[in-house]
Amino acid sequence: MSTIAIPTVVEKSIGNQTITLESGKLAFQAHGSVTIKCGDAVVLATAVMSDRPRGDVDFLPLTVEFEERLYAAGKIPGSFFRREGRPGESAILACRLTDRSIRPLFAKTLHNELQVILTVLSADKENPPEVLGMIGASAALSISHIPFDGPVGSCRVAYIEESQEYIIHPTYEQIKNSQLNMVVSSTRDAILMVEAGSDEVSEEIILEGIRRAQEANNITIDLIEELISKVGKPKVEAPSDTDAAKTMEDQIKGKLNGRLSEILEQNALKAERVEALESLEQSIAEELAEEYSSDQISGGFKNVLKEAVRHRILDEGIRPDGRATEEIRPITSEAGVLPRTHGSGLFTRGQTQVLSIATLGPMTMRQILDTVGPDDTNTKQYMHHYNFAPYSTGEARRVGSPGRREIGHGALAERALQSVLPSQEDFPYTIRVVSEVLSSNGSTSMGSVCGSTLALMDAGVPIKAPVSGIAMGLITDETGKYAVLSDIQGIEDFLGDMDFKVAGTSNGVNALQMDVKIQGLTADILREALEQARQGRLHILDKMNEVLSTHRSELSPYAPKMIRLQIPVEKIGAVIGPRGAVIRGIIEETGCSVDVSDDGGVTIGSSDQAMLNLAISKVEALTRELVVGDIITGKVGRTTDFGAFIELLPGKDGLLRNESMIEGETEVDIGQEITVMIREIDHLGRINLSRKALFGEEEPPTQRPQRPAYNDRGRPRSGGGGGGRGGFNNRDRSGGARDGGGQGRPGGGSQDRRFQGDSSQPPRND
C-alpha cells in the first residue's frame, strides 16, 4: 500500500527575489524531481538516467529539453492543430544554457543515457523562466542518485548604466531597461558558463557583474544543499579510467616513433593535418589489431593527440598551425560581393570563411513568436540566421533543417549586432541577415558577426558602429599552468578547455559566450582572456575598416523604400476601415506594404516610387483635417434638386450647391470627378463647396465660428446632420488636389520621417 509523500520545501532570498524549491509532490517516479518558483513563475525540472551505459558512444549522451507550455501564460497555440509543435528558438536557447552549465560536471567516462526535462508550468510575464530551469536542473540532478559533481548555481544579472546598479534575477522590464543582460553559472570556486548581450559595455562592468553573479550563485548552492540534506539520494559511482585504458595509451605512444610530433611540426593546413592524423591512427590500429578494436584505438589516439598538442602549446608556446598564442590568422574582407542582394559581406580568417547577406523588408515582415514571455517580447524586427553546410568541412552528409548548434550560433551573432541597429522610428525596416558558412576551421560564429556587419553597412543600414568578434581558447594542466589562445581553430576548440567568444565595437562588448570543459575558471584567467579578446577584436576591426568603415549613404536600388508617417491616434480607424477594408484596398491598389502601429505610426514600403507616393497620398488624404480654402478633387456621391454631394475623403462629404457651380456645369453625374474649393465649414461641421470660388467668381471663402458641441447646461445641441456621412467605406480615393491644386496645405497626416540616408557617407559602388 502506497503512502502519500509529504513535499519538502526550501527557500531563500536571492537578490530582490525569493527562490523556492519543492520536491516530493510532482513527478515522483523521476530519479530527481524539483519544482522551482519565483513570483508566479513555476518550472518543473526532472532528471532520469538509464540503468546501463551505451556501448556505441564514447561521450556523455546527455539531452536537455525545455518545454514552453503556452497554457502557462494563458495562451492557446497559434498553430493549425492548436498544440505546441517543435521547440521554438527561445526554448532551444534555454536548453543550451542548461546543457552548457551542467555538462562539465559529469565524468567523461559516464556513457549512460541521461535526460533532463524542464517544463514551464506557470509564467507570470515578469520573471523569465530560463534561469529557473537551470537552477531546477542542478537541484534535480543533485538530489538524485545520478553521479553529478554539483550543485551548480545560476542567475541572471542586469546592469543599469544610469544608476550603476547590478540587479540579480531581474524582471523582464528591468532587462528591457538594462545595458547588460548576462547569465552566469558557477560552482563555489569557479565560473562554468557565461552568456551575455550588452550595449557596448566595458570589460570591467562585465567582470564585476560576473563577481556579483557568483556571490548570488553561492546562495543558490546553499539552497540546493539544504534540499539535498533533506531528500538527497546516495550517488552511484561513475566509471573510472581503467588501468587497461592507460596501458593501451602507453602502447599507442610506443608505436608512434616520433611520427605524431613530425605531423604537428609541419604546421599544415587543416585538411592535410587531418589526413595525416587519420593515416597515422589507421596504421597504429592495424599494428594493435590483435589486442584492441578500432573504436578503442580511436579513443586512445585522441587522448594521446590531445596530450601532445597541449604539451607543445604550454611548454613551447607553439600552436598546431605555428602561431603564437596571441596571433590572429590572416584576414581578408569584401563588401558588395553579390549584385542583386540588398547587402553582402564576405569575411575570411584563415580557413574560416563566411558569406553574410542582408535583406530589408517592410515592418509587416516582423517575426511573430509563440512564447510564454510578455507580449512586447514576442516580435522580432531583426533576425540573424546561420547555416552550416557539409561542404564547409569537406564532408558529404544529409542536409536538414537547422539544428540546435546553428540556432545558437545565429542567436549569438544576432545579439552581437542588436545594440548597434537603428531604432524602428529612424529606420522602419525589418532586417534579416543570413550567414552562410563556406569554410570552417574554428570561430565561424564570430566570422558571421564580422560578415554580417559588412553586409548591413553595404545595405545602407545606419548602424552605430562596426562590430567584430573573436573566439578565445584555453589550455591548462594539472599543475595550474595555462595559456590563453586568440582566434582558435578547430583542433584547439576540440582539444582545449574553453571556448570563449567575444563580440563588440571599439567602445565595448556587445555579446559574449563562454563554455568550459573543465570544472570552472578563475577570475584571473577570465580577466586575462577578456583583455586578450579586446586586443584581438580591435585588430579585426582595423582590417574590416580598410574595406568599409561605415554604412553606405544610399540603400540598394533593389531594396524597398520605407516611409514612416505619424498620424493622430484617433485617425487610425479611418486608415484601417471597417474590418480592414480601407487599408486592404490601399495595399491591393498600390502593391505597397502598410503597417499601422498603436501609437499612430504608419510605415509604408515599396520598391516602386510612384506606387509609394500614391499610397502616401491616400493615407494623408484619409487623415488630413479639412479647412476652409482647401482645393480638393472628389467624386460625386449623390445628386439633389439643389446640388450635389461630393465625397472629399472617405466618409466625409461636402455640398456643392447649384448656385456655386460654374455656368454650364449645373448637371453632374454620380461617380464624376470634380475639383472644388471648401467655401465654408459651419458650426455643425457641414461643408459647403464652390466651383466659382476656384475662378474668382465668388467672394473669398470664410470660416464661421463654430459653437461648442454642448450648451451651457452640458447637453448636446440639437441640429440636423451635415454633409459628412461618417463611418468608413471601402472605396479608395486619391487625396490632394488635381491640376496642381492643394499643395502645401496643412493636413493631419504629417510625414515626420523619411529615410534618405546620409550624404556624408561613402557612396554605393554598384
Image (spheres, rainbow, N blue to C red):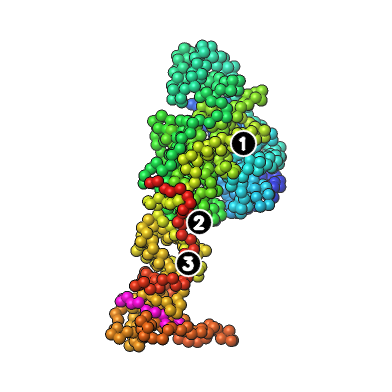
Measuring from the top left, give residue 512's x and y in whole percent. Answer: 57, 40
Q: Amino acid at mark 1?
A: Leu
Q: Name the residue located 67 percent from the left edge and 33 percent from the top edge.
A: 524
Q: Separation of disc 3 and disc 2 at Cα?
A: 15 Å
Measuring from the top left, give residue 428's x and y in whole percent. Answer: 47, 56
Q: Which residue is mark 3?
A: 750
Q: Separation of disc 3 and disc 1 at Cα?
A: 48 Å
Q: Which residue is mark 1?
A: 530
Is residue 12 magenta-colored? no
592 lies left or right of 209: left
Measuring from the top left, give residue 57's x and y in whole percent. Answer: 50, 27
Q: Name the residue located 67 percent from the left edge and 35 percent from the top edge.
A: 523
Quadrant that contains the N terminus: top right
Tag 3–tag 2 contact (CB < 8 Å): no
Q: As drawn, which residue projects farthest toward the front?
A: 760
Instruction: Say if 615 sits above or below 659 in the image.
Output: above
Tell me, yes or no, if residue 279 can be seen here: yes
Q: Secondary structure at mark 3?
A: strand
Q: Separation of disc 2 and disc 1 at Cα?
A: 33 Å
Instruction: Say if 52 sits above or below 227 in the image.
Output: above
Residue 426 — which label?
2
Disc 3: CA contacts within 10 A as few (<14), some (14-19) or many (>=20): some
Tell me, yes or no, if residue 233 can be seen here: no
Tag 2–tag 1 contact (CB < 8 Å): no
Q: Name the residue located 51 percent from the left edge and 84 percent from the top edge.
A: 705
Magenta part of the chain: 671-681
